[in-house]
Every structure is written in structure tokens, then in C-alpha cells.
Amino acid sequence: MSHFGSDESLNTDRPAQAHAFADAVVADRELPTELVQLGDLSLRAKRPRISRQTPRVSLIVVLPEHHVVSPDRLAERLRGHEDQEIDIVVACAGQPTNLGALQRSIGEAQFILAPAGTSVEDLRELAMRQVPGDIVTLLSGGLLQEAGATAEMSMSS
Amino acid sequence: MVPRRALSVIVAVRNNAPTLVRVLTAILSSNLPRDRYELIVVDDCSTDGSPELAARYADTIVRLTGRKSGAAYARNRGAEIAQTDVLAFVDADAMVQPDTLQRMLMMLSDRSSIDAVCAGHHEDCEPMNLVSQYRNLLLRFGERREHGTNGNVGSPCAAIRREAFLSAGMYDEWRFETTPVEGIEFGTRLSEAGREVFCSKDLQVTLLRRWSLRAFCVEVCHRSALVARSLGYQRARRAVPGDLVFTLSRPGAPVFAALCVAAFSAAFVPRLEVSLAIAVVILGAITLNLREYVYFAKVRGIAFAIAVTPLHFFMQAVSGLGLCAGWVLRDMFGDRAPDAATQAYAEVGVDTWPPVPRAPNIAVTAGR
């Protein structure tokens, strides 16, 4: 390979070479999953590096301790994007009182229950290690109203 | 009613964890209300946990996988998902002042003729070693001298109208995948497209990166070579006169001429002492750089100005060598291009994520 743009490698049979290179690059990207660690919490963030045509989108909803979010509102925000591949992670500090309702309304979401008292920043970092997305939108529970609009924008991009 | 965001702050990062938290905290500490901007961090394949750290503060994280793609590529990906009409690109080692972003936004809002606003370097940078201080003041000197309208989008913090950014073809991720001149190149294109870029010496950021002599030499040499090889010295200098390369190389030709005259005289006039000739050359070089030294002395004192004098000569020589190398490379091999695999990928036209680097939409031709 020539990094400085000499054109000797592209002189002959360019289409065949191009396809061969493209295949080689695709094969090179199909690597095994990687392990990410957070302090003394060993967490696997499975991000298989497979070739995709579009970015994988993840949405992290952060619920601080004693924060209650309406399951209906959350589900309503996400309902318009059921046809899209989107990973939803709800990170909670402590167990929310309406956890069951939340799980029923957004069944496909992954819930992370961190110890009570975990800060919003730590929840965000924790959740970030769990999501596989190439584009990750982070929403805090208090901003959920705005969050819906943001998520829509990111998901449609 | 959700207030409409006015600004997308985009930070491209690669293994900048030590400085990233402070950079993002500084952005969040801005006078600009939090609901007026979105914070996007684009991670260029970091291995030090930068995206997880960024997640503590940012609204959106874009993770690029595979191999390092460079700042131009990462910023372009951030711009593609930005939702506002103004994009602010902040380096991952540059701390904005509390009023920087707000004032940039106000300038763009008040003056419709301006398409981009660039902040300069604060006279104080955080690392206290001589090379970092010298580099920072050298950049600051160029910015003060060229304050006003020019195309220096190579600034560590620049706000650009989204429409101007897109119509100018975004950063050149095709040729400058791993090099630091994407800002100069983009500024040159903006300037040639008739877009107005305003560089304000009153808008400032503080640099956090510590520079070693070796790293600075590599940067100056690489930067100079690319300016000569890919951008065209005269063309880039017209558009971005305040850049480091031009501040260093401006007195280069007269100094070289004086050196030649002294050597010529020494060869043909036996009585002329060689040391006298050298003294004359050094005196000439100091005279030609007098403005820089006066500025250094004003800001850091005479001792600092004297201490950096040999360093300044040395960096001018490095810059000169880089420029010469760039011209030679251009004559021998032509302009830069991405590696063969990237070219092949682009030629095949495979849709993939992360996307294959693209050439800017606007044709760029470099001339000397």
C-alpha cells in the first residue's frame, strides 16, 4: 500500500484490484468482540465489528435515584421508531418504583440497575460501556421531554 | 415548548482522556445555556476509554471503529448528525473560556456576512515547559498579526454556519486523514469560495497539551511539507496568513539570502573573518524576527525572549526544510491521496459504516 498517493498500485486492472481491496478491508473488520472494563466492575461491552451499511443507533435513558418517569411517555417517544434497529438502555440508580411498568411498556429495552446513590455521570458512563451503538444518544430522565425530540433527530439521521 | 438549539459543539477525540474531561467541563461551564447547544463527541478509535468519559457529559457520542481516521474525518461525521445551523469545532485539548461559544454565536447572529468565527490562543497555556510556551506564543503572535478577516479555520475552536460548511465541501478527509492541516485547507477553500471567516483575537481558548521539542519539530516539519506539497504555499498564505508555517517561514528567504551573501563574501574576501560573517547573519536574522522577540519579551519577559531565540532559529530551519521537502515530494510523486485500500473502497462505492472517506465536493487545485 502506498500512503503518499503514488499511483503504481492502481495502474492495471483497476476494477478487479478495487474489489479485492474492498473484500480484504471487509474481512479485516470482522474481528472478535472486545472486552471493556470499568474500574472494579467487570463489564462486557459486546461490540462485534461487522460491516454494516448504516450506523447502529443506541439510546441511553438515565434515571437518577427517586426519579420517576412515566412508562407511557417513554414508550410513546420510542413508538415511532419500532421499525428501526435501535438499542435502548435504561440506566437506573436504585430500583425504580415503577420498574415493572417500564419493562412492560418498553420490553425490548435493557435495564441497568446500579446501586442507589450512583450519580448521573456514573450512570451514563456505565450505560455507555453496555451499549453497542455507533451513534449513542444519552438522555437524562429530567430532560425526557426534550429527549424525545433529540432521539427522533438522531435516529432519523 | 422545547427551546430550539442554536449550536452544535463537536469535539473529535482520539486517546485524549487526560484532557477531555476538562475540555468538556469547560464547554458545559459556558455562559451559553445548556438547552441552547448540543454536545457531540466523535471518538476516533480511542483505546483509553475516551468515549465512556465523554458519555458523562455529552448528548451524543459517535464511535468510529476500524482504524484511525483523523480529525477531518471525525469532525465531518459529527457535522453530519448535528441538528443545528451553526457548528462549533473544538479541539480535544483546547479549553474554551466561559464566554467564547456565546460570543461566537452572537457574532454569527449579528453579522450575516460572516460565515465562520475563529477563536485564538490565550497567551497562557497550561504546560509550563519552554517548548509549549513558545509554541503557544508563536501561534498567538500570528493570530494577533493577522487579526480580522482571513481563512484561519485551523484554530482550536471555530464556529461555522452549517450551510457554508456543507457547501464548501466539509473538511478534506480524503487527503488529510492523519495530518494537522485540514483547518488550513478548509480555510483556503472557504476563502476562495468568497466566504468570510473572522478571526478574533479577543475570543480565546487555552491549550492543555504539553509539547516536547521532538513532537513540535515533527509537527512543524510535517505541516510545512504538506503546505508546500498539497496546498500551495502562496495560495495558502494568502488565505491563512496567520498560520504557524507562515509565521516561521516569512523571514526565511531573507535570512537564507543573507547567509549566502556572507558565505560568498567570506570565500572571496580573505580578510573577512568567518565569525564576523556569521555574526552579521545572526544579527540580520534577529532583526528580521524582531517583532516576534519584542512580543515574547512583552508577554514573558526578556529572559524568555533570549531563551527561545535559538529555538526560534531552529524551528525556522525545520520549517524551511519541511517546505523544501514538500516541493520535492510534489514534483516527484504529486499530491497526497489516501492509501490504496481506501481508494479501492471509494471506487467500488460500498456503503458501509463508518463510511469510506470522500473527497470534498469542490475541486481543489494547488499551485505555488
Image (cartoon, coloured by chain):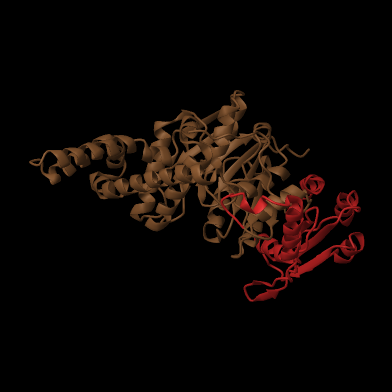
Can you give x and y, in whole percent of width and height, for residue B10 in the image? 63, 46
User: In screen coordinates, is B126 left or right of B109?
Assistant: left
Residue closest to the eye, B330 or B127: B330
Relative to A27, residue B13 above or below: above
Residue closest to the eye, B253 or B135: B253
Q: Is residue B296 visible?
A: yes
Relative to A150, residue A57 above or below: below
Rendered red, the chain in question is: A
| Residue found at the far front of this picture | A12
Q: Where, by quadrant of the figure, is residue B79 drawn? A: top right
Relative to B70, residue B263 above or below: above
Q: Residue at x 60, y 23 (%)?
A: B113
Which quadrant of the figure contains the C terminus of chain A?
Answer: top right
Q: How many marks?
A: 0
User: In screen coordinates, is A99 left or right of B330?
Assistant: right
Can you give x and y, in whole percent of width and height, for residue B77 in the image? 69, 47
Q: Residue at x 71, y 65 (%)?
A: A28
Which quadrant of the figure contains the N terminus of chain A?
Answer: bottom right
Q: Residue at x 42, y 48 (%)?
A: B220
Residue closest to the eye, B332 or B323: B332
Rendered brown, the chain in question is: B
Q: Is residue B286 visible?
A: no
Can you give x and y, in whole percent of width and height, for residue B269 in the image? 11, 38
Residue closest to the eye, B257 or B149: B257
Can you give x and y, in whole percent of width and height, for residue B203 in the image? 49, 36
